[in-house]
Structure formats: structure tokens, C-alpha cells
Amino acid sequence: MTSVTKHSQRPATAGRTLRGRFHLSERTREAFTGYLLILPLFFGVTILFFYPIARSFELSFMKTGIFSGETFVGLDQYKRLFNDPQMWVATRNTFLYAAVALLEIPLAVFFATLLHSKNLRFLSGYRVLFFLPVVTLPSAIGMIWALMYNGDFGIVNHITGVFGAPKISWLTTPYVVIIAVAFVGIWMGLGRSIILVLAGLQTVPKELHEAAEIDGAGPVRQFFDVTLPMISPTVFLVAVLNVIASMQVFDLIFIMINPDTNPIYRDAQTLVVYFYEIGFIDSNRGFAAAISIILLVIIMAITGLQFWLQRRWVNYDR
């Protein structure tokens, strides 16, 4: 009888010892579960984001060829890049495009404020119209706008001609072509920015507007003193996303400016288009990797500057 009792108690004692040895607090278990859940995302970001950056950084120090493999050349690719006039043309065009594309931010705030009004009729229809270009293929948009910008029969010249303006060859005139394409980019991305600003407007407490109205503030003063400070974090987010997307423009430039027929194609290249030409047409992967690293540094510098400046105008107090 005694031996049976001792035998039945032995596994329970071992189990308590095992649980005591590997006892985890509630906080540790929650942290472990959290890390376990983000593990797939961590591997995805590492493989799809950090590895290409690291590989591009490595390639930028290599001289590559189709049959010669990769040879370490140090900073030669960067020295060649900074002495390349076409790189400076592409950099200038990239900054010009991004500067014009910044107009999308005040336009998004303006139209989002209008669409936020409850007194506007056909509100859902306007929202669909603004968002329709966002879900349309950039290639289709580029082809249609290339026809609209045609210097001989394009509708844009017909509209500006009503006001007495001379005909302009929008896509074959240096500088003008970048501005013309940038306006298409604004038209294409405006709906996305409006949706974000609309989401910010819906978080503004009505009590603040009621209090401002009691104090005698009109609609314009309410907008600048109440609405704009309250949605400034959303506007900052739109600005950051807009600049990053503008610096990486490729599809519109490549489609609207035909490299085979446009005489100013090289004068209208942006950094990403130049990267495509060097990397995929000339098969010079090392030099193309150096271009991509320079673009990455520019975007990081501008984004860092935006985060530094946001402390002066973004209001996070609610």
C-alpha cells in the first residue's frame, strides 16, 4: 500500500519541479508572445527591405560586367557619379518635381475641408471622383495625359488658348516638361492625400469649433486657429509621404516622355529613370547601385529635416 502511494506521487513532484525551474512571469510571457507575432514581419522587412539596401551598398563599391563578375573598386563609382553631368541633370529634375508636387498638400487640405462640409450636395460622388485616379493604372494616366499635353492637338493648349496663351509643347520643352508631369502626379495622388486629411478632420472635437464660434471667430479664423493646428500631425504625415513618393517618381516620366522619340528625354530624366537606364539597359549594376544609394541618402536627409522642422509647427497636444 505504501509503495503504491510513493509511486503515484513521483510524477507530480517532478512536474512541479519542472514548472518551477521554467516559471515565466506574466510580463515575460506577454513580451515573448509579442515578439513571436512580429517575427514573420521582421523576416519580411529584413529580406525585402534591409537586404536590398545592404546589397546595393555593397554593389556600389564594385565594378560589374555581364561576363566579368564583380571587382572591388572602392569609391570609384561615386567619384565617377559626382563627375557625371547627367547625374546632376537628373538630381535637378528630381528636386524640381518634388518642389512642384508639394502643391498637393494645400490642395488636399482645401478639398478635404470642402468635402468635410455637411452642407455640400453629392458628397459621395465628389469623393469617388477625387479617389478615382488613385486606383487607375499610372501607365493609362500617363498615356492619356501625353495626348492631352500634345502641342498640336492637345486639349490643354485649347483651354489655355481661350485665355490668349500661346501654344506650348509641354512634353518637349526643358523644365516645362517636369512641371507638366508633376501636375499630373498631383492629380493622380490628390485623392489619397484627401482621404488622409479627411480622417484627420473627423478627429477634431466639435466643442472646439463651438467654443471658437461663441468667442466670435468666423469660419476662416476657426480654420487657421482650430482646424489646422488640430490636423497638423496628419498634414505632416501627408508631407512626408508626398516628398518620398515624389523623389522616387518613375512611371509617369518614363511613359509620358518617350525615350525613343522625345528629343529632350535626357534633359527630363529623374534619378530613378537614370538608375533604370544605367542598371537595366546598360547593365552597369555597380554604377546604378551608387545612384540608388545617393537617392537613399537624399531622401533620408530630407525626411530627417522634415522631422526636425515638425517640432516648430506640428501640434500633438489634444
Image: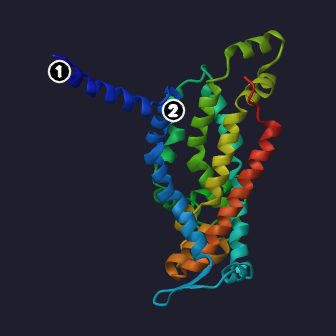
- Give the labeled residue for mark 2: 28
| 121 in relation to 264, above or below | above
Q: Which mark is residue 201?
A: none
| 91 in relation to 81, above or below | above
- Give the labeled residue for mark 1: 4
Residue drawn where x is 37% and y is 32% of the image: 18
Q: Nearer the viewer, mark 2 or mark 1?
A: 1
Instruction: Point out residue 262 in the picture as x, y percentages from the top left corner.
Output: 58, 76
* The quarter of the displayed image where residue 309 is located: top right
Q: Residue furthest front?
A: 2
Q: Nearer the viewer, residue 62 or 241?
A: 62
Residue drawn where x is 67% and y is 18% of the image: 205
Q: Amino acid at mark 2?
A: Thr
In the visual, does 132 lie left or right of 264? left
The numbered mark, 2 or 1, whose residue comes first in the sequence reads 1
Instruction: Point out residue 243 in the picture as x, y percentages from the top left corner.
Output: 67, 52
